[in-house]
Amino acid sequence: MSDGPTGGDVAERAFLAALAGLPAMGPARLRALLDLLGPAGSWKAVSSGRLPREVQAVIGPRAASVATSWVEVARTCAPEAVLAELHSAGVTVARRGEHGYPPALVDDPDPPEVLFSVGRPVVSENGPTVAIVGTRRCTRYGTEVAVEFGRGLSEAGVVVVSGLASGIDTAGHAGVLAAGGGSPPVAVVATGLDIVYPVENRTLWRRIADAGQIISEFPLGVGPARWRFPARNRIIAALADVLVVVESHLEGGSMHTVTAALERDRPVLVVPGPIRSPASEGANRLLSDGAAPACSVDDILCALNLVCPEPVSPVADHGAPPVVVDPADLAVLDALGWEPTTLDGLATRTRLSPVQLGSVVGRLQRAGLVSEERGFLQRCSGSGAP
């Protein structure tokens, strides 16, 4: 029996692709339509202009004008032709929860309902994933670190995701490609897959598509717009098991990715930078707020629980429990007590920021003082704190 799509699947993908290409069709509006009517029913509704009240409520005050614009486009749009154009460009279409859609995005608080991709389905495969993000206006220092991390992580079997932008994104992707034979590169872009942005990355774009995967929630023909980059960043954050910031200005776009990662309880590691470098000002601020430093590939692998160096104790008595001296560590251990609790519960007790608490908990786990099981944190019996 063939594992390929059936005739019904092809028709559904045609409707999905056509719906995603309608003007002012965002993920929330598309989700409301599909949840109520499915792909075929949704296309029938937008073609007739008769939208369910639930969908009109999601659209808001402009529901009537949006519905009119959808009718005008739908009258001249053949879903089968849209899908044929995608196929001729080598683009696949995947709906949330279906084959080819990244598992990490299925239960996301703000998931893209439809994804377009070229290349192999890297993010649909199991395996650790790290996002490398940073400023477009990077320094030589940042470039070298991003290349080193991209290459080292790929060689260690970790999938590296970035945004195919200039600067740190480009350097991270280049490092992955330089690994040669490691985990393939993944890029998430803020345009349709036929619009290369920035144009100077055309060769890199082609190399990533050949070796790995490029993903977008936007249909063909969609060009860059300011609002689409934060939307792209939430997908990068959601795909990653760990987010690594290499260089970032205070108001850099990568700071939006950090926010999205923290909202999704993803650990954030930050590369320390020169204190006089504007390119590291945002990164250093994250470190001062309690983010864990990423000074080597091993630091990132440790955050993934893949490789962690054994703690070295200056005390010869191996029977003695580790001694906690950091006040923040002591405060978190005291708040944790001896009953299992969630990270959210611990945050309420300690009133620490997500970055600060994540850094402390990670440090305590590496020291063997705290363990995590099924989403609950628990203090280990050998803890050397009161």
Image: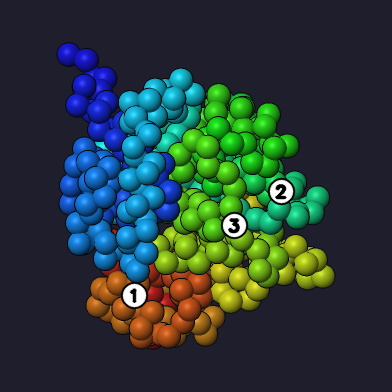
Q: From mark 1 to mark 2, how far is it between C-alphas?
A: 35 Å
Name the side, left or right, on which 352 lies relative to 132.
left
Marks 2,3: beta carbons within 8 A:
no
Marks 1,2: beta carbons within 8 A:
no
| Amino acid identity at mark 1 | Asp
Circle number at residue 344 = 1
Name the side, left or right, on which 213 lies relative to 109.
right
The image position of residue 276, as x and y in percent, is 82, 70
Q: Which residue is at a point 27% across and 79% down the rendered structure image?
A: 338
Marks 2, 3: nearer the viewer: 3
Circle number at residue 167 = 2
Looking at the image, which is closer to me, 70 or 182? Answer: 70
Which quarter of the image is occupied by the C terminus?
Answer: bottom left
Number of residues whose C-alpha sits closer than 10 Å to that of mark 1, classed few (under 14), some (14–19) or many (20 or more) = few
The image position of residue 364, as x and y in percent, is 45, 70
| Amino acid identity at mark 2 | Gly
Q: Which residue is at a point 58% across and 44% down the rendered structure image?
A: 223
Q: Which residue is at a point 53% across and 54% down the rendered structure image?
A: 228
The image position of residue 252, as x and y in percent, is 65, 63
Circle number at residue 226 = 3
Number of residues whose C-alpha sits closer than 10 Å to that of mark 2, classed few (under 14), some (14–19) or many (20 or more) = many
| Amino acid identity at mark 3 | Arg
